Image: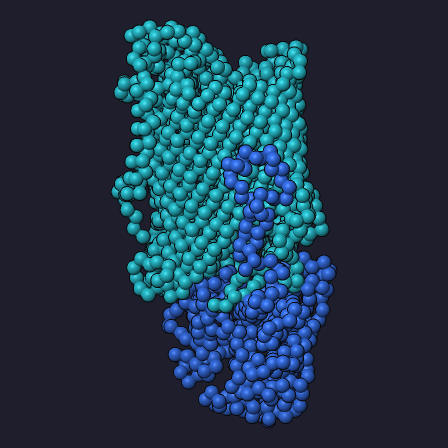
Chain colours: A blue, B cyan
Amino acid sequence: MKLMRKGSGCTVRGLGLGALGVAVLVAGCDFEVTNPGPIQEQFLEESLAQPAVVNGMGRALAQGLNWLSYTGAAVTREIHPAGSTAAFGISNEWSQGELRTDDRNLDTHWNQSSRARWLAESGVARLERVGSDSPELLVQARLWAGYANRLMGEHYCEAVIDGGSIQPRTEYLDRAERYFSAALETASGNLRLAALAGRASIRVHQGNWSGAAADAAQVPTDFDYFVPYFSVGSDDQRNRIAWAGAGTPYRAHTIWNTQWEGYGLSNENPDGDPRIPYSYTPGETGDAAIQCCGRVPFKRQQKHPTDAAGIRLSSGREMRLVEAEAQLVAGNWNDAMTLINGLRTRVGMDEVTAANANEAWTQLKRERAIELWLEGRRIGDRFRWNATGAPGAFHELELPGANSNLVQQDFCFPIPPAERETNPNIPVG
Amino acid sequence: MHRIPCVTRLLQPRVERWAALLALLLLAVTVPGALLAQTTGTVTGQITDAQSGAPVGQVQVFLQGAGLGSLTNAQGRFPLANVPAGSYTIRAERLGYQAGTGEITVAVGEETVFNLAIATQALALDELVVTGTAGAARRREVGNTISQIDMTNVLEPPANMDALLQSRVTGMTVTPGSGSVGSGAQIRLRGNVSVAMSNQPIIYVDGVRIRSDGYAKNVPNTGFQSRSNNDVSSPLNDINPADIERIEVIKGAAATTLYGTEAAAGVIQIFTRRGRPGAAQWTIQMDQGMARVLPFGPATADRPPSEPARTSAGGRSEFLFIDPWLRNAWQQRYSLSVAGGREDFQYFVSGTLTDNEGVLPNDYEEKVNLRGNFAFFPIDNLQLQWNTSFTSTELSHTASGNNAHGLTLNAFRRDRNYASSEDREAIDPLLNQELISQVERLVTGATATWTPTPDITNRLTVGYDLALQNNRNLRPFGFALAPTGILSDRRHRFATLTADLVSSYNYRINEGLRTSFSVGGQMVTTETEETGAYGENFPGPGRPVVDAGGSTLGFESRQRVINAGLFGQLLFDFRDRYFLTLGMRVDGNSAFGENLGLQSYPKVSLSWVISDEDFWNPSWGQVKLRSAYGHSGRAPGAFDAVRTYNPVGWGQDPAFFPLNVGNADLGPERTAEFEAGFDGAFVDDRLAVEFTYFNARTTDALFNVRQIPSSGFLGSQLENVGELKNSGIELGANFTVLRGSRFGWDVGGNLTTVNSEVVSLGGAPPFSLGNFGWIVEGASVPVIRARCVTNAGELAEPVFQDDCEIGPANPTRIIGMNTTVSLPRGMSITTRGEYQGGHYIYDLAAFNAVTRSVIWAGCYNVYSIEQTQGRDAVPAEDRARCFLPTRADHHIYPSDFFKIREVTFNAPIPDRLVPGDSRATFTLSGRNLFRWTKPEFRTFDPEMSNNSGFEAAVRSISEHIPGPSLWTASVRVNF
């Protein structure tokens, strides 16, 4: 292991030690300065360091997803604010559905997810340049690079790469597809399924429905691919949605006043959908008063039951819904409903019906909300459906209005002040 | 948490051990002195002021060459016992007075009376100072201003060093962090000279560099970094004020050049007491005090109709509803010291026990101070001085600040808190968090001064400052907000090694011209190490250890940095009234980048004692003109120059994150300063005036330049890109209005202005230092910038404007004032006050409360208007502050304040009440008894800081309580 160390023996860069002779004799001939811990960059070139480099990519992705999925869930009303506005809370602006360009609280989201993208891409480049003893390591690195780019492509209105100028958000999506495709060149097993599922989810955004369906078809329904979180005392490594909604220290969000209250599986609704699990202790409220409503009932999501619960990045059920949406796009709404109901009966829920394509689109949008709940995907879906003018309706509690307490609803995160104020390639104003 | 009663705790083994050690030490020192005494004759007498005839206390009276001396009491009287028969030269010395001498003859068995009148000297031009010069220099030779605190003039018993320094030095601000016991204070000399680095002055004690940055905050390594009392204590406060003889303070780069790459923020030199030849002089002092919190919120009578006078817990708006948990805190201190010696060996030994309660329920401070200062003269022309102090401190704190698990936050937020209730029963369980911080501190230094000829002096000082800190932070099993418990144990080691060598040679070229050449070197090695252990999820109740936790983590860090430099100084002295000093310091530092070589810092200063000129009429008084120009620096942090990755782990696996971009060209920032002014004594030495104009410019200023996040490195990188300037004046005056043998009246005042500006950002974008403090070209350093209301006073909805520059974050004008009334029988009353103004502060606690719909006392006036006249009658700015949706930006307030810092009554206890030759003094002193702020400043205290304590780059107000007022009664006995 290389420690940070400067100088050695009795020489420290020509300090005029002659005049200090007496003092040196007294103080001992030791001019070594040390700072063990931080690692100098060249060490990362060594093969023994490569697993830690790739793990860093995974952790960075987990942290970026932590921030974006939680705030995105509040804006799209997958959850309702219940308390704290700072620390692990939801700010008043986000509570109202607002994602403002001048909101410095959004710097962290950008910083974390940008680091995930940069770390993964630069790490892949390093592995490709110096070679890797483990081919699987390179596949994993490319997967992290693909998911990091998907995270940004699904959340941000525009893209910035490595301090460059602003580009369309599709730049992230295009990069994600390239990394997933590169991973598929040598991937096998679950990593191959994850790459296929990841690429299918990207092709949905790109409007490449045939490509998306072809990838999705290769992924079995029961496949899951998670990014892990850890309860090791470090808040950065905890599942933020779980931790912020824990009874202690925070009860910052609730299922109360969302479309899932009374629908999901809970102690107050034992026949509810198991894909939307939550719990409720009568009388319990969020940890603090919130701007719209004062103290509100605390109904805790249980999809992420602990702060060590992983967040799903891809699944076979998502792939069935990709296939269903491809069918809708192709005008085959009955086939789409069959796929949707296949997922519902799989978990013991009643089938839903549609009398026409419009209603089928409504059911697809709702089913994606259920399957991908609290996985950081809803805001991306809302953006693309809004952009393409996809048919179908939404529940009133996920739309702006007096009941939802949403004043407006932004479907993408802006490039925040942290980037705008430091990047010379972004014009001021 | 239950606290053992104070008296019982004082008898605990830990304190007992130190008391026994102190007693042994004192015995060892004094017995030889007693054996040396001979019973032959006595000398008594009185020292009086030559102008007024009033007695002068604290005068050192000694027989030259006999090793006998004494200290005068408040009546100016002194005794010298056991004086061998013979003739002597007797000498009386005290800072601020010209020394006086006389001849006496002592006969066996007789009492010889010697009375002497000594004259005040407002300027003391021939007094030696050592700060800012290579070796010692006379005041008349020095071209920069040097402030001095003479402890004989400090009548109050200061609670700690921060209290001692506060409002006593022109151009210095001392700002406490909070009302937590042991809270350290931020010290600034002429404002900020750096944006990225510490602005805390560096500190020397008897020539030994000691740590000046704060101790570590007691918070777990992991988790939300506010599960703490959110304040830091200051190593400066480990020094016992009673051990100090005098303090020298130099401000600005023109004066600090010879201290090199870390001195741009100024230097504080502390000189501790020394023994004098003579019999052992004992001093016993006992202080008993009571601290209490002044109101820091609106009056209950101002509440809106909807609000009750008290909360369910009994809280009132004057204290933001926390008063049921506040207490009048008993503070006590016991000191014992002895000083004496012979011509070839002198000693000063002291010990102090301090036991202070804090005003918050879990707060207490126990401190043991021991000191031994010894001087040896083994051969002619060689003096060896060995000074050592040891301090053992235990601090217990109440969780406070912006801490959801803390008392203060949950009390301030009333029923919108984390207990969902403002009831006492709901909040009391939060007091179960234990925050214990222990520090053991050793400062030892030896100085050898060799004077082979009268013109050559060599001085070598080697010193070591070692502080071991243990922070233990426990939320026990069953704690309301962490039911399975959390324990953190962090151990810190802070060490500073100083080696300092200086040689001086005086050479007289001709009758009128003398030179003094000094050359030397200095090396300071700083080590900081930490090991931390963390455990959570304990299996059950009981006192846990870390490894009993279901999850455990370990942390470690260690750094070692060296700064070394050479310096030379050449002084030309023409006719003892014109002085030119040229100096240069050359430094290397392990924190510099690879491409950077040694750094050189020049200085030049001029001094002209114009009142010594022939044309000067002595009745005009005495005046010294002075000016100085010099450079100083501030080094970047250790290893800021290197590109690094951080091993962060991911679950149980290793992982790397990018950490530091690195900068091979990184070097120190350089501050060049010009200062000019004069020192004068007028009207028969009744009026002393000091004036200084200063103008400093910092180039290559170190800025934490934010990196572009999309480039992967999220932190900022230090770069030498900026330019700052800082200018202002310092004016101080003291006037003796009345000078009589029974009554006297002195008044004094000082004015400091500080105008700072960011001249250039070097192409870097404006950046935030947090708490709305920004670095923006053309604005002050830093400026408070936020969204503001442009129609503040209008009865309308607020109209907003982004990025308003509201005002400086630091005071731009400081006015101090003091007066002392001398009364018959040696009694006196002293009062000191201080005003600071022109600056602004962000009140995070107010925003946090209002945004959570707390009925906030700071908005009582607004609620009253709304409830009685309707919302339309509320001005726009108040709507933005007190109605939802509010934003943090609207909770920025003017910080102007005036405080009565001190009122002290001092009286000698009549001799008939004191046995034998003992002399005793009674002092009653009150601190911070009154606070005035602007009407808009409705809650808390402008002298507060946030979760970073005094180390905050930009102070703000978080959920702390303000520093309390303090009354102390003290009895001091000398024998």
Q: Nearer the viewer, residue B105 or B215?
A: B105
Q: Answer whether residue A59 is visible to the viewer in this image.
A: yes
Q: Position of residue B525 (x, y in %)?
A: 53, 42
| B802 over A48 or under it: above or below | above
| A299 over B894 or under it: above or below | below
- Residue pictured at 50% horizontal, 41% vertical: B496
| A414 over A206 or under it: above or below | above
Q: What is the quadrant of the C terminus of chain A in the image?
A: bottom right
Q: Quadrant of residue B742?
A: top left
- Residue pictured at 61% horizontal, 44% vertical: A12
Q: Nearer the viewer, residue B870 or B253?
A: B253
Q: Position of residue B108 (x, y in %)?
A: 31, 7
- Residue pictured at 65% horizontal, 69% vertical: A130
Q: Answer whether residue A154 is visible to the viewer in this image.
A: no
Q: Quadrant of residue B39?
A: top left
Q: Position of residue B866 (x, y in %)?
A: 50, 55
Give the mark count. Answer: 0
Image side of residue B346 versus residue A367, left or right = left
Q: Position of residue A398 (x, y in %)?
A: 55, 76
- Residue pictured at 43% horizontal, 81% vertical: A265
Q: What is the quadrant of the N terminus of chain A in the image?
A: bottom right
Q: Nearer the viewer, residue A171 or B80?
A: B80
